[in-house]
Amino acid sequence: MTIEVSTFKERLWQAVLQSDVVKIFDNLLTIAVEEWASDIHIEPLENYSRIRIRIDWVLQELIQYPRHLHESIISKFKIESGQMRPDEKRLPQDARVSNVTQTNKEIDLRANTLPTVWWEKLVMRIVDKSKDIPPLSELGIEWSNKDIIETYLKYPNGIILNTWPTWSGKTTTLYACLSEVNIPEVNIITYEDPVENKVSWLNQAQIRTDIWFTFASWLRWWLRQDPDILMVWEIRDKETLDMAMESAMTWHLVFSTVHTNSAVETITRVLNLWAKPYMMVGTFNLVIAQRLCRMNCKRCKTRISVKWDKRIEYVKESFRNFDKDALKKEVISRWISQQQWNDFMNEGYVYAWTWKDPETGDVCPVCGGSWYKWRLWIFEMMPYTDEIKSMLLEWKQAFEVEKAALKSWMINLERDWVFKIMKWFLSLDQVFKFVKAKNF
């Protein structure tokens, strides 16, 4: 923790003692941005209220304050937002507000109030406009996965889907992909709900369901905008799926998202939306699945053996039916040494947390005793190869498609996180929280 953040935390405490609502917000926003928090929770409880911020996926309590101050804090935000009614306390309300922190960083806040049995809860999603969209090369997409996504980004038409649960970083991945294909010769249009990041080189449209401007109704408008590349924020229904497929069939490259837990499960999801297999074969290029895991703290991590942990056997099972030549090439290309492979596969060595500074024995100054610092993506790429297309036309089930893909070439989520455990980025405990292990 830096001295500056400590100073702002002290100022926040003083502002609470003085019941200075303006200073509470000023210092709170600054702390959240400097700590790289993604969300702020201002919530009432039975006997007191509290403020929590989400850092590296985990909520951390920042401060508690008396209940009598809570209404002033919520009302102050409603008034300044200009988009919420201060007198409406029975219904949830939404707002989007721009602000500047005390460290001169511009941010957007996507805010929502929720009436609870104690009072209204306010949650603010932080979009730090000072952060640039990272290039695709910095997202942790390695070797065969990297080759696959770079290949399909060069295609002139078709659909690239990103499948994700909440908090998996899909926004960053989609914008990074669009950044790769952004050249002066192409026209890129996005249809988003909501527009989370305003990007200077994109033509971004905000979906407005209240006036019937929905994902399914945009076709008549975008055709007049002469687009080359489209991004549809989410495929939620048959109409939107049909529009995306029709766009891909008419020589457009389409990016979109869908809610499933893995790349192969998109087959079942899309078929349930009444898509025909021949349409999937003719339009789908690539499906990406991803998770965002917390990285080991580089300062306080230590090596331990978990040789007798039954999860190690599951890890070994994930490579058992993998093509041996493909596996060898993947290991070498990811710069995993023979020693690292043996240490993990034979001896069960992994890196775990200690939360202690190895030099002083005190709480680690880098992670603050939380064991983890920063986050790292794990990815799964399922390109629609000729083999997969043939299986779909034969009405093969999704699990049969996955089995065939895993046997020959596919690096799924499980395999990608195993490689990153071998390279000491992730802990065994952490990834099992975010990857659906089939044997457990």
Image (tube, rainbow, N blue to C red):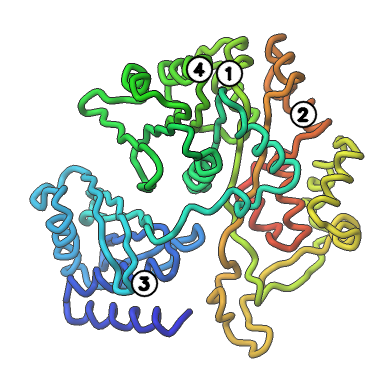
- What is the quadrant of the C terminus in the image? top right
Q: N-terminal of the two: label 1 or label 4? A: 4
Task: Tell me how far mark 2 sits from mark 1, CA to CA.
Answer: 19 Å
Q: Position of residue 370 (x, y in %)?
A: 55, 70
Q: Earlier in the sequence, mark 1 or mark 3?
A: 3
Residue situated in front as seen by the camera: 159 or 368: 159
Tell me the quarter of the picture where residue 285 sits: top right
Q: Earlier in the sequence, mark 4 or mark 2?
A: 4
Q: Residue at x 40, y 34 (%)?
A: 190
* 415 relative to 263, above or below: below
The type of residue carrying mark 1 is Thr
Amino acid carrying label 3: it is: Ile
Which of the two marks, 2 or 1, is nearer to us in this view? 1
Left or right placement of residue 339 versus residue 46 in this view: right
- Mark identifier at residue 283: 1
* Nearest the eye: 24 or 188: 188
Which label sits on residue 161? none
Instruction: Decide if residue 410 is on the left or right side of residue 65.
Output: right
**Label 4 sits on residue:** 245
Labelled pair 3, 4 in contact (Cβ < 8 Å): no
Q: Is the C-beta separation of discs 1 and 4 under 8 Å? A: yes
Amino acid type assigned to the residue bearing label 2 in the image:
Ala
Instruction: Tell me if label 1 and label 3 are in contact, CB under 8 Å.
Output: no
Outermost residue, front side: 185
For marks 3 and 2 on the same chain, the one whose residue lies earlier in the sequence: 3
C-alpha gap between disc 1 and disc 3: 46 Å
Q: CA distance from mark 3 to mark 2?
A: 46 Å
Residue 191 position, x and y percent, is 37, 32
Return the residue nearer the eye: 415 or 335: 335
Q: Which residue is mark 3?
A: 31
Residue 369, picture quadrant: bottom right
- Relative to residue 269, is residue 385 drawn left or right? right
